[in-house]
Amino acid sequence: MHRDGSWLIVTPAGYLNDQAGATLNTVFKTSDLSGIKVVLFDFGETVIVNSQGIACLLDNCDALIEEHQVKIAFCRMPQLVKEAFSLVGLLEMASTHGTEQEARSALGHV
Amino acid sequence: MSDQSFERSFLEQLSSEKRTLRVNAVVQLAKTAGSNEALKALQQLADGADRELSFYAAQAISRIRARRGDSSPEEQNTQTHQQGAAQADGPAITRTRLLSPQPSEVQCILTRIRSAPKSLPEELRPPAAAFFGRFGRENDVSFLAAWLDDPDSGLIVPVIEAIEALAPHALTAHFPRLLSSNHPIVRMRAISALQRIDPEEAEAHLSELLASRRGEERMAGLSLAFLFPFPKIREYLITILGEEQDPEVLRACEALLASNPEIDTTLRILDLIDTAPKPQAARLSAIFKTVCTSMATAGLVDGPEAPQEGIIKLWRRERLKKFLSDLEIQIAVATATRREAIEDWLAKNLQTPEVASFVEKLGQDPATEEVYRRLASFLPKKTAPVPSKEKVTPQQRSESDKLLLLAKIDKTGWEQHSQWVREEARFGPPALRAAAMQALATLSVDAGDLPLAETAIQQEDPDVQLAAFKLLELRAPEHLIPRLPALLASSAPKVRGRAIRFALKRDEKAAIQGIDWMLRSQDRTLRAQAVSCLFLFPFEKISDLVLLTLETEDHPAIARQLLVILLSNPSKDILDKLDKVQTTTSVGVSMLVAQARMDLFDILLKLGIDVQESAGTRSPACESGQSPALQAKTATKASRLAGSTQSPTSREIPATSATAVKAAVPIKPYSVAEVRQTIRNREAGQRPFAKKDESKQPLPQKPRDRLAGIALFATIIVALAFLPIMIPKSSEPVQPEEASKATGKGSRGQDERRSEEQIGRLSGIPATFRMGRPCKLTGTVVKMLDKQCFTFECEANLFRCTYPGSLPMMLNGEQISVEMLPYRKLPNGQIAAEVTGLTLPR
């Protein structure tokens, strides 16, 4: 996870399961999100996101939108992850893009 | 199309990327070609280093020359001198002599080979097998079977054919190895031979081949499909068409469909076209037109208009209603791209009363109401502006205008309309009441609304109930808890779905019971809605339920979502359980399950989970050796006996299907389950090996005469099915330097399949070498081997690196950093590695 101006880029790697999800929760809770306008999840290095990982993402995305009024974006999603997110409604909470660059172009370098 | 056109087309296919097609082109040229140009092209192949293509080209040349009558003794003599010296007991046995023997030589050759089959040079075995297939007898099978030693070489195909011709049952013991071959045509030929002995099991193997993620295997399966009853094959084809991207596979499907033109097929292709993303829809439209033309040619449709126009009219008349009801399910579970395609289609057809009414209906279902909202403004009756009503009070407006106004009210207009909104929420007709309740939920903060919502949630209308639910959930969730049992038992799907999500937070057990009830429903829409909730449950609590539901699910879109849940929670246990799942409800679902097994296996490999297992340790269902169809029938029967507390409208879900099939049926060593495990064990010994992207294959040629093209393609695959076919895989002794290349070929079956999916790279890659794990190493380029391979030295290890695309310019001795996945130690001590990233010095 790294910050780039008003963007927060999160790059989950490997298997996003309950443990990785818990780490994600902790990171978001302990991070200073002031000034962040877009949180971009780059799934290019993610092999798979399981049910608990999806539950964590849902919670985090909810909180980010409701509490911090940030925009959520996803990029480089493997097909299976895309299908899973679509099924659970996660894609309706975020914009999806091919790459980080495309996300920046689409969201106008907020 | 003339013979010359066919010949030209086959000559062009000799340069196809798909080996299956190249071999087929050789076989076809043997049948149809007669020109010197064809002979020249075949001679080049016959003289080449590729032993398989060389053999088939030689076979083709001998046939063409025999047909032309220009086989000359001089050529024979030349071959004799080139390929072997004359022996004391007769002329040397050469490839040419075996492929085109003089009648007077046959007995002599038979006697000599029978007397010392082991002394026959290995390279002469394929032509000798072809020779014995023509002139041998049943007893010859004893030594021919010994030539089936390398099931991954296409050179054993003539041996299979010879044994099949002489004594088919002698192949039984060899089927497990042949059916698990890494070589598509060996598998295909083995299935074809199995069909004579065990047609049901052969069909199960065909299904696995067609479900393969590897284009060449799907092509081989399609070639074989001509030998099976078309009504069954059609189901596979329709399933494949929905997602297939490979132009050659699509052409093969098209050829099969056009060769068996049926009205129902065209109607089903139309169903697919209307829900497919645009690029796929365009491909399917071309296939639709071809099949229509084929139907017209066969006299199945007549009339003055173009055949496709007539079929489209027929579809509108007979299938629209069914299609729309299916669409509702698809919208609930479709991916974003597919949903977009569906929305486009709906928007285009909104003027059709049935479609407009369907869109209205979507607004009543929470799973589809988003689509309704996006399309509502295009609905015929809502497109007209209502300027004259601006000065009319809300109470005086018509119901539809009131609904529009309620949808438009925002925070700025809330104060002005709040009183009217509360009146509508209390006394309005159901639709208005629901809309008013929603407005209250989003715009009001008045505690006085809560009793209003509590009253509304007890109403019969589901929309009103749902709106009240949302209001209470948002502002006073504790008021919902006493009402949960009633809400979970609600017959309204949208209320139940919402209640499940809520209950999950409060009473998980009740929520699971609720979702179980929904999944057992005969109403597909309800099941689709339940599936979308399943991801919200802890996986371990619902995994068995998902698997059981899968067994009876007949809708591919819903089945796919169930499989996505399983694939997203990978484990060896789930793979074992998925192996036991057998479904007879839909061919489409069966194929999806087969694909999911392969995908899950690959995911487990990626995650480094041990998936190797000795044969015969699998599920009772698999061990029974029953075909999937038989297993499923037995399972369903058993589940019926088991019984369960189901509502009259619920479907039967086998509760003990896996164990129920532990019947005393003899194990077939060549059953799909056994063969599948053999393939897995082989794959587990190899690591993923990124290969070229199949999507980069050349586009199909522009059809000059599409139907003629189809006829040609049909000829090809029919011939593939019936003729001696072989596929190349060099079994010549490999040099150490080439050993890894051979390994690469050997693993191609898996590699190409995997190459179709994205292989995720892992972050935080360590900078030290780890076998079977991603790492980033800095070292020296030792040698560039070709445009995709190079050797690389680091940490005193020599890596043979393969890059998925074309390598950038690199020099021997150059320092670079390589992100790689080392996966195997080669016999020459090098470590084979798949490169995922390169960093060159600036």
Image: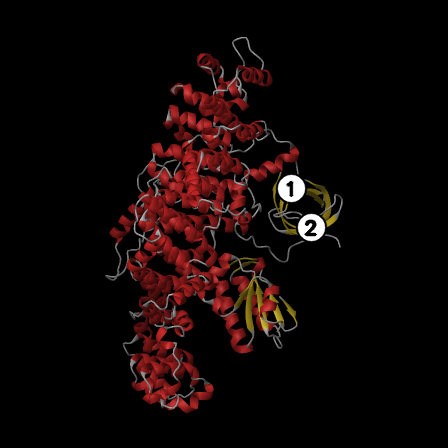
**Circle 1: element type:** strand
- Distance between the alpha carbons at the discs numbered 1 and 2: 13 Å
Q: Is residue B483 above or below residue B842?
A: below
For the question of whether residue B221 can be seen, the reply is no
Name the residue located 53 percent from the left edge and 78 percent from the top edge: A67
Label of residue B385 in the image: none
* Image quadrant in which you'd find residue B212: top left
Asked if marks 1 and 2 touch (Cβ < 8 Å), the reply is: no
Extreme-left residue of the structure: B648
Tell me where residue B351 appears, x and y as whole percent.
35, 68
Q: Earlier in the sequence, mark 1 or mark 2?
A: 2
Q: Quadrant of the N terminus of chain B?
A: top left
Identify which residue is drawn at 46% across, 32% down: B28
Q: Chain of mark 2?
A: B
For the residue marked with disc 1, what is the amino acid? Ile
Q: Position of residue B414 (x, y in %)?
A: 43, 88
Where is residue B487, by image quadrant? bottom left
Closer to us: B216 or A89: B216
Q: Nearer the viewer, residue B828 or B555?
A: B555
Q: Residue at x 61, y 70 (%)?
A: A8
Q: Position of residue A32 (x, y in %)?
A: 62, 75
Residue to which mark 2 is pinned: B777
- Image quadrant assignment for residue B437: bottom left
Please tell me how crowded label 2 is: few (under 14), some (14-19), or many (20+) other residues with Cα within 10 Å: many
Mark 1 on the same chain as mark 2:
yes
- The residue positioned farthest toward the front in the image shown: B304
Question: Which mark is on residue B831?
Answer: 1
**In the image: residue A5, left or right of residue B149:** right
- Outermost residue to the top: B88
Chain of the residue under the numbered disc 1 shown in the image: B
